[in-house]
Image (cartoon, grey):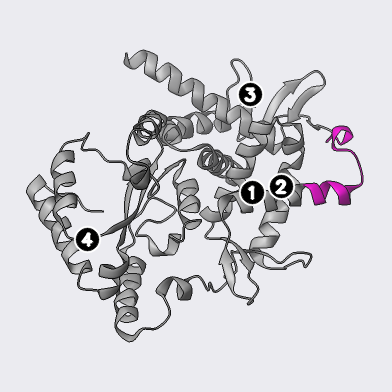
């Protein structure tokens, strides 16, 4: 979480951290969990510089490493590390776990091993938050001294917030987060039904990411009625079931549900006009927004890209604009899903053309 000017300074900081951890008797008995988090903006930019020095330091410090978690979003790194693990000792390999995916997916995967997102100094929006991490460490030291139950067992009890999605089996929650989720399912279920398996999976991940971006979590109650945060796979399954339930309540096969296009007699100046040589104030605004944010769009995962496109759509709607396309009977207003697809394609085309000009 901190950048060092010199390798020696970084090695001293790591050595000090390890020795401080060894002050706890519980650490001496149970060891520590080491983690390499190379995802998104937290990616290691050192390109391997100092790897041997860090390895020698880890071997020389009298600390037991109980487990190692490697979090990556680079498919090439993932393949190389998985291949390398096959060559090491089986006893050591059993302590190493490699997680591949986006920032959100890696945090969920870590939570399945007891490494909760709220104990990490990393937020869902790629920011450093040391407060809760240091609070967890202080609690661990107190636990080792007074013999109370573990910090993790206390932290797992979560206090639900208004933005959270509360999943309570057959019961329906009227929490704000649940209401938002139901509205999003209504908006997206036609697109969900028409998609392939991969498209449905990406849509689900985008929907889950949008809940997290609004400050919400997916929570369930355990047998002791304590709220717990769901793993990504479990949240994905629950949202899939919500889509199925919505289809069942609708009582009509999704394949025959159609939304009649809205015919517009005359475009307004703030409307976005799709098609060749279509100019308007709204179209110009869309072009400027694409120009401003295409680099940010390229750096995001699929779920976050959907959120960015929707923010562009919201900006245009705030100006009074609509998304129109020339049809056989005049101008037709596009649905939200159609407009999102058009804008995503326009961003991709602009980025492709920009790279050609730059080269």
Residue 63 among those drawn in magenta? no
Element under label 3? strand
Query: Which of pointers 3 and 2 lies earlier in the amino acid sequence?
Result: 2
Left or right position of 174 against 120: right
Per the model, the C-alpha gap separating discs 2 and 1 is: 6 Å
Q: Are dots 1 and 4 in contact, CB under 8 Å?
A: no
Residue farthest along the bottom direction in this orientation: 146
Per the model, the C-alpha gap separating discs 1 and 3 is: 34 Å
Q: Point out residue 302 in the picture as x, y percentages from the top left corner.
A: 53, 37
Query: Which of pointers 1 and 3 lies earlier in the amino acid sequence?
Result: 1
Task: Look at mark 2 in the image and give the residue it sits on.
Answer: 240
Task: Look at mark 4 in the image and give the residue it sits on.
Answer: 63
Relative vertical location of residue 347 with respect to residue 108 in this rendering, above or below = above
Q: Which mark is residue 274?
A: 3
Q: Which residue occupies 17% across, 56% down?
A: 14
Element under label 1? helix
Q: Which residue occupies 57% across, 51% down?
A: 232
Decide if residue 316 is in sight here.
Answer: yes
Q: Which residue occupies 36% across, 29% down?
A: 80
Query: Which of pointers 1 and 4 lies earlier in the amino acid sequence?
Result: 4
Q: Point out residue 141 in the picture as x, y percentages from the top left corner.
A: 29, 77
Residue farthest along the right direction in this orientation: 251
Task: Look at mark 1 in the image and give the residue it sits on.
Answer: 236
Per the model, the C-alpha gap separating discs 3 and 2 is: 33 Å
For disc 1, the neighbor class at 10 Å (few under 14, some 14 to 19, many from 20) is some
Examine the image and state in which quarter residue 74 appears.
Answer: top left
Query: Which of pointers 3 and 4 lies earlier in the amino acid sequence?
Result: 4
For disc 2, the neighbor class at 10 Å (few under 14, some 14 to 19, many from 20) is some
Left or right position of 343 against 8: right
Per the model, the C-alpha gap separating discs 3 and 4 is: 62 Å
Q: Are dots 2 and 1 in contact, CB under 8 Å?
A: yes
Relative vertical location of residue 70 with respect to residue 22 in this rendering, above or below = above
């Amino acid at each position: 979480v901190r950048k060092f000017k010199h390798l020696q300074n970084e090695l001293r900081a790591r050595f000090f951290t390890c020795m401080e951890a060894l002050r706890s008797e519980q650490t001496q008995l149970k060891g520590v969990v080491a983690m390499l988090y190379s995802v998104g903006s937290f990616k290691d930019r050192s390109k391997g510089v100092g790897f041997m020095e860090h390895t020698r330091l880890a071997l020389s410090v009298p600390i037991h490493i109980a487990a190692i978690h490697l979090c990556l979003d680079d498919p090439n790194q993932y393949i190389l590390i998985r291949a390398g693990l096959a060559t090491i000792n089986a006893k050591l390999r059993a302590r190493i776990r490699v997680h591949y995916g986006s920032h959100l997916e890696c945090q969920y995967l870590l939570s399945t091993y007891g490494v909760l997102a709220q104990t990490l100094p990393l937020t869902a929006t790629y920011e450093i938050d040391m407060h809760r991490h240091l609070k967890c460490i202080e609690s661990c030291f107190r636990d080792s001294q007074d013999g109370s139950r573990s910090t993790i067992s206390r932290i797992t009890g979560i206090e639900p917030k208004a933005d959270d999605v509360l999943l309570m089996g057959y019961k329906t929650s009227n929490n704000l987060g649940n209401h938002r989720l139901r509205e999003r399912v209504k908006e997206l279920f036609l697109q969900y039904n028409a998609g392939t398996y991969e498209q449905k999976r990406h849509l689900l991940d985008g929907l889950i990411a949008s809940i997290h971006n609004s400050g919400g979590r997916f929570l369930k109650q355990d047998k002791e009625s304590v709220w717990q945060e769901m793993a990504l796979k479990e949240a994905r399954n629950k949202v899939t079931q919500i889509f199925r339930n919505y289809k069942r309540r609708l009582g009509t096969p999704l394949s025959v549900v159609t939304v009649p296009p809205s015919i517009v007699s005359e475009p307004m100046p703030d409307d976005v006009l799709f098609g060749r040589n279509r100019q308007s104030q709204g179209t110009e605004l869309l072009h400027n927004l694409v120009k401003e944010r295409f680099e940010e769009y390229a750096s995001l995962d699929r779920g976050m890209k959907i959120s960015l496109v929707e923010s562009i759509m919201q900006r245009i709607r705030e100006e009074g604009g609509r998304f129109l396309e020339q049809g056989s009977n005049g101008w037709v207003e596009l649905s939200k899903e159609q407009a999102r697809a058009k804008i995503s394609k326009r961003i991709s085309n602009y980025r492709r053309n920009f790279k050609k000009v730059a080269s």
